[in-house]
Image: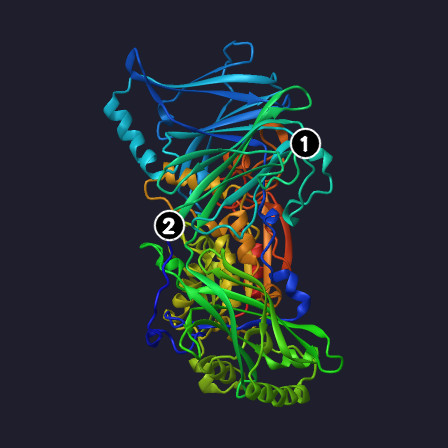
Amino acid sequence: MMKVVVFVFAVLAAVVAHSAHGLDHKMLGGPPSEFKRHGIPDSSLGALFQSSATHFMRFEQTADNERLWTYEVDVVVDSDEGFQFSLMSPLLDRLEPTLRDPSGNAVDLSGHKTQSFWPVGDSATEIIGDVYTFEKPAVGTYHLTLAVSDMAEAEFLQRVQGARSRSKTSGDGILLVWNESQDEIFSKLTSYLTMRQDDNLGFQAQMYDVTANPSLVKAKGLRPTALGDAVSAAKLEVFFPNGTRVEEQMHDDGLHNDLLANDGVFGGSFVPDVCGSYLVQTVLEGTRSNGAAFVRTAEHSVRIVPRSLELTGAVDMHVDRAQHRLVVDLAVKQFQVDAGFTDLAERYRAYFELHGRNIFTGHEVPIAWSSALVAPTAGSNGAPVLRLDVDLAWLAAAAAVGPFSLKNVYVQEVNTFIPVSTMGAIDAPLSASNDVALWRAFQTANATYDGTVTEKMRFGVRPKWLHERVTARASGNATAAADANPALVLLHGYCSDSNPWKHTSHVWDDARYFEDPKQSRSHDKFAQLVVEFAEKEGLTSYGLLGHSQGGFASVHVYNYYWTGVDASQGARKLQSMGTPYQGNSGAGFWAEVLNMLVEEGCDSQEDLTRDGAQMWLSGISAEVADNMYYYVTQYDKGGPLGNGYCNMLTNAVLAKPNDGVTEVDYAHLEGAHYMGLTKGECHIQDMNWPASFLNEDRNKLMNAEAAR
């Protein structure tokens, strides 16, 4: 049962735009043409497309030999072109695999094995894995036995206890089976609106033929045509934050959020009754058109947030004539959350679309959108509100005043960007006195508005310190020049053990290397740490260049916070290399690998999943995206099966092509400057081609173009 919390608002910040961290928050705005960019995204945009099946291994002690431990599983091969199975386990060095073909004959595994590794984030740390590759195999069901012989129980438990305790699956290792097949699983959350504690969280999955969907662009959220009669069994495997495992059947009856009955789309759901990170696996089994049995799985890493806040539908509006802003207070009700999750109930991203009446026709017209990171504060009646505002120049641009309404109103939790409350429309009347004040302020705005979209309209009112800093730099006087400390801040990625840009330190001018080693941070926390780093370095202005997640952090800094980036001068305020702006389809699998096989590994980071990225993107202004210049790389041709790869292990779960971590299809940021694709470069070192951050010619160009 939720409890309403009574807050003493005197202890809250008097100005919402200034956080407890000393960061000045921007008040974002834009024209109606951008409404579509900022709505809560369709969950199809975050869908997974996989041609593999993942099995979580659990070894058993044999009854007749206490020093022999085995794991057995059927390996379903439905492609006569090729298949691979990969093994990762704390027992890897002692595993003795035996594979029998569909006829029961032993398969000679010599010559099929290649050792690869699974990267631990963007660091040099590696998880070793064995990959067995088979070209032109017989189609059918193989049987794999993995044995660990002559190992005492004490040694066995010592090896696996860490993996069992850290992982959600309580497993002893992971078996990944990949088929070179055109039949893939399409798997997605039903909606992003049911990701709170005690919601009914739904999933959809279907099989589809890649060749039958030639116009499918995975990054655009299109649903492929389902193979209607291919699936004979469908289920959800749900692993709770505490390791509890629940199996739920998926149905194609039109009654389980699965679209129409017998259309090949299967639906299933469960109720997450605790907050935290879940691993949810969709599993489809059936028969391909060639008569071969198949198994496909997709792994979703999903964060569940508390029911911490909801919109009440009440709105209070007034005019700030000094700053020429229409201030909008959204009334909210707050709820107590479980201990340990208060960080998911402190700050939010609020959003609405403002509509009014045209001053000539009286017809309703869209005016602008407004959004910011905000914390609840006390409204005019002392009750909690989320405060946003709109520059009155947007009203002049639309030739509109009240009565107003707010549409597509929603609130996201800031660490995950999961929606916690939504309302389709709210009437927003003004009091008589404020109506008069608005009309007078509108006349002033209308008289001065020349059609130019200004920084103030886009980002709100600059804080005094930034205004003074920019003014001093623009003055060009000697004192200002002496006090200036411009720089280029270079950022690493997720869970990195060092800053990769240091490898070419001789290339960078005025460089500062941000380092937060071996950490899993939300984009917001990462961004805050970057700003704090720049302040500690005494930087008065700076550009940002990010590798991998560092690209997300760069965009986040410039989008939500007033910083030295806003004072920078130069062609490119923001640049990135190898950033998966639309998420990583292997992130769910990645999280379990790290939990299971790295003693001090990084926690799962849902901001990097396909779903998390889509929810984060909904908040990024087109104006900010236009300041990002990004680069993408991928493997070249070669290797087993001839298709090329940067990393054999990760290639089995990533969309192709990729750089070993970031998939090319999911590397694009809408509205940003795409600087091109380079083949024969990978995400990090020790992959099959050089790391992208080692390209000195490109680095020299980025250094020369970077703002400071």
- Disc 1 marks a residue whose amino acid type is Leu
Q: Nearer the viewer, residue 609 or 421?
A: 421
- The answer to which image quadrant residue 178 occupies is top right
Q: Which mark is residue 518?
A: 2
Evaluate whether residue 686 shows in this view. no
Neighbour tally class for label 2: few under 14, some 14-19, many 20 plus, Cα within 10 Å: many
Residue denoted by label 1: 227
- In the picture provided, is 10 more to the left or to the right than 573? left
Residue at the spot x=49%, y=54% of the render? 549
Q: Measuring from the top left, give residue 617's x and y in whole percent.
A: 56, 58
Q: Nearer the viewer, residue 129 or 330?
A: 330
Neighbour tally class for label 1: few under 14, some 14-19, many 20 plus, Cα within 10 Å: some
- The answer to which image quadrant residue 2 occupies is bottom left
What colour-coding does the image apply? rainbow
Residue at the spot x=59%, y=79% of the render? 391
Q: Nearer the viewer, residue 690 or 468?
A: 468
